[in-house]
Image (cartoon, coloured by chain):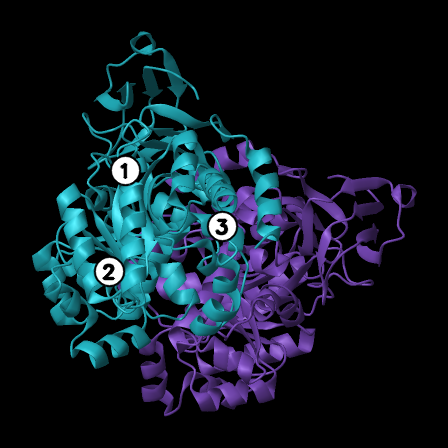
Chain colours: A purple, B cyan
């Protein structure tokens, strides 16, 4: 890892509340100063960023990173076929080693496309924690609990979740947090969800859960409980400012008001919702009603990559066409969904380029044809940039990517290991 | 330009009717042989492509390339505001020099993201032809005629179209074709459209026209003519196997049958239709009914780039969610839309990696994290690849991009010129 205590990012176009050209001084793991008066003597490392855009690192608020190993498995299938015939049989073969290999592959992909923090729910999470620690980025990690309404299974799942708190919460210089992650209201018993809420509250952790992803799920919950999924979760005390609800596709207007009142965050997953034909989430309505709305890629096998630039563009475009209103999802709103809203959701002091914030910074090349002209830098970031335009990535004050080269990870070794790991699934 | 008469592409994974590993021999401007028996002595230039996917060059069937200069102008506006307040006032300042600069910028972007052929409609098209000739790719170019129902204007527009035929048809070793391009049924008189049909037919040219892009257009045509846009165009004789209809968003089931009967090609433009909130085209129905359906980026200011990889993914994803059926738009169908269907539309013997076809070939890197594992190469191309994964591009048997470096164009000079050109709009 590049060990530096101060970095001067010289003269980029900065996407802050305003878009302006200035310099950024990073000291230790924070943004110390943003000013035009900084000079080369102020820092140990100087990055000439005159032809770069500086923006906060992207925050991917819903994913299952080890699923990189399942890229291209079971495309174009109906959801239940996809799960039953393609995904679950392979996931049954998962091991510590395979999850580590898949997580490492995801670290490479995320760092190279500008993501500095992600929110994950899966299995063998100590392995993902190890990959995050080595890579140098931030993550909130949860053990995905599914009890399928079985008492014994519930106890075991909660035990696993508690072990993850012990092993991993606040590790890696505080870059890793643990969240409590019951899978979904239709795969977890009421007891499991209630105990999850208590476990999260007792340990001051986030609660991360899939909700209202498909029509089938909504129908099932309505049949079982006589109410829609978010209403049902509210009766279990599961909706609060610490809740991150992934998907939220079939949310009713009443539920949207409830989410706003409770301060729940929604993680919108456009590629996944489109690819699995789950539906179109009412994102414009979420924003209109003040719901903290963020963006996730979901797992790779329903996407099929982890590129948050694509997700930003897709988020805006899908809402415009779905409402037949091109004025919804302004570039600034979309950008905030992928940055500061995600940081707020995960309770981390980042997601914005401001003095005092954690130094999670991405530098994007502007001297490439598809970023020319630069009439509106924010527009180019949201609508024109590709993930591969990320030139430099700093997380927690450390340079993890410099001139498109990883500093903490051996890319070829990770690719080779992932290839052989995928063959074992 | 790299002048070679034979190229051996050694050992790539080839996306042909089957996906298989083999070698490709290019002689002059054609694919001479695809075989496992080729060796280094068979060609003057040998490209080791063991870690690459070889696929046909992408075909962008609807664009206005010089609009690269308007990237980021007027995002998130209603269509009429966008046109009236942002686009048209700037287009009024266009000159030969500016269109040349914008076209050159587009050549760089397209070559670097895998496009070998495009279908364009705009102004000052001799300048675009010049840029295409220098770049080495293929294009079908049309002068965009708009008479706004004025007799004098109509005559002038047809004169311009005829001049373009004379100056540019079948130039650049046959890489440039001219098409007849009346703008749209609501901006062109019936006479102009009829004369366009005759002009195209007399000269054996394609007819390229915007149709059924917005609800407003459909309403207007129905009010004027008592029928929907495609039915109206049919009464003018404008629907044939030589017709490329851009957008086709609000097409009715009856019209879809008509398009199928007449052999019309539809150019689907997902980003543009979404960003301008025009609507969602019935692409799954087009394919179901045997309509030759292709993909276009439209102009940059309603996209905001020319990356056909994004458009492929978006095409598939939007149809799945719109029909709530993940099984529509299989990877192969989407891929064909972006390749062979486009070649068929433009009447060029390319779009497939087969012996005897023109050598328009793209090599895509597979040794990057987001292309690992390579369980299904076609899936990785459609759903996981970024435009920037294009490593090498061959058009008409010439190498235009090698290891991501342009061979025919000076990228920095073009970027610098485009930046100053954009300031003049």
Contact check, label 2 and label 3, Cβ < 8 Å = no
Question: What residue is shown at x 41% (from left), y 77% (from top)?
Answer: A323
Q: Kindly indicate the quadrant of the structure image that contains residue B371.
A: top left
Task: Say which of marks 1 and 2 sits in front.
Answer: 1
Return the x and y of residue B47 as percentages of the image width and height: 40, 19
Give the Cα separation between the discs numbered 1 and 2.
Answer: 47 Å
Q: Under tag 1, what secondary structure?
A: helix
The crowding category of the residue bearing disc 1, from other C-alpha atoms within 10 Å (few below 14, some 14 to 19, many at least 20), is: few
- Of B90 and A215, nearer the camera is B90
Q: Which mark is residue B166?
A: 1
**Picture layout, residue A208 above or below residue B373:** below
Q: Is residue B389 visible?
A: yes
Residue position for label 2: B327
Q: Disc number at residue B68?
A: 3
Q: Quadrant of the C terminus of chain B?
A: bottom right
Q: Is residue B173 left or right of residue A68?
A: left
Upstream in sequence: badge 3 or badge 1: 3
């Amino acid at each position: 890892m590049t060990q530096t205590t101060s970095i001067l990012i010289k003269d980029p176009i900065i996407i802050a509340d305003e878009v302006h050209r200035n310099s950024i001084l990073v000291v230790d793991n924070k943004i110390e100063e943003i000013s035009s008066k900084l000079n080369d003597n102020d820092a140990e490392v100087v990055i000439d960023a005159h032809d770069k855009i500086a923006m906060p690192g992207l925050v991917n608020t819903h994913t299952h990173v080890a699923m990189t190993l399942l890229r291209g498995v079971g495309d174009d299938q109906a959801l239940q076929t996809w799960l039953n015939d393609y995904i679950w049989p392979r996931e049954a073969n998962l091991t510590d080693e395979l999850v580590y290999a898949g997580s490492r592959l995801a670290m490479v992909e995320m760092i190279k496309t500008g993501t500095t923090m992600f929110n994950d729910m899966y299995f063998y999470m100590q392995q993902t924690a190890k990959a995050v620690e080595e890579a140098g980025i931030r993550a909130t990690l949860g053990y995905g609990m599914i009890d399928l309404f079985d008492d014994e299974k519930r106890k075991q799942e909660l035990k696993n979740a508690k072990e993850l708190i012990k092993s991993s919460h606040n590790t890696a210089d505080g870059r890793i947090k643990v969240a409590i992650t019951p899978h979904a209201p239709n795969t977890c018993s009421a007891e499991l969800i209630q105990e999850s809420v208590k476990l999260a509250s007792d340990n001051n952790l986030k609660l991360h859960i899939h909700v209202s992803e498909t029509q089938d799920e909504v129908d099932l919950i309505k049949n079982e409980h006589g109410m829609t999924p978010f209403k049902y979760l509210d009766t279990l005390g599961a909706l609060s400012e610490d809740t991150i609800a992934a998907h939220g596709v079939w949310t009713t207007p009443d539920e949207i008001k409830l989410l706003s009142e409770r301060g729940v965050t929604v993680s919108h997953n456009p590629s996944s919702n489109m690819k699995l034909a789950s539906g179109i989430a009412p994102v414009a309505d979420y924003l209109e009603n003040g719901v903290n709305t963020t963006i996730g890629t979901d797992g790779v096998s329903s996407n099929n990559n982890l590129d948050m630039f694509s997700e930003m563009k897709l988020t805006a475009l899908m809402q415009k066409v779905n409402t037949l209103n091109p004025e919804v999802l302004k570039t600034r709103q979309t950008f905030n969904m992928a940055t500061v809203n995600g940081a707020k959701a995960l309770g981390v002091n980042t997601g914005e380029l401001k003095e005092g914030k954690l130094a999670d910074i991405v530098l994007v090349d502007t001297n490439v044809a598809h970023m020319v002209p630069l009439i509106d830098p924010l527009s180019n970031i949201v609508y024109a940039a590709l993930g591969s335009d990320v030139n430099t990535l700093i997380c927690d004050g450390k340079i993890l990517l410099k001139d498109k080269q990883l500093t903490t990870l051996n890319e070829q070794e990770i690719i080779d290991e992932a290839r052989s790991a995928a063959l074992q699934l």
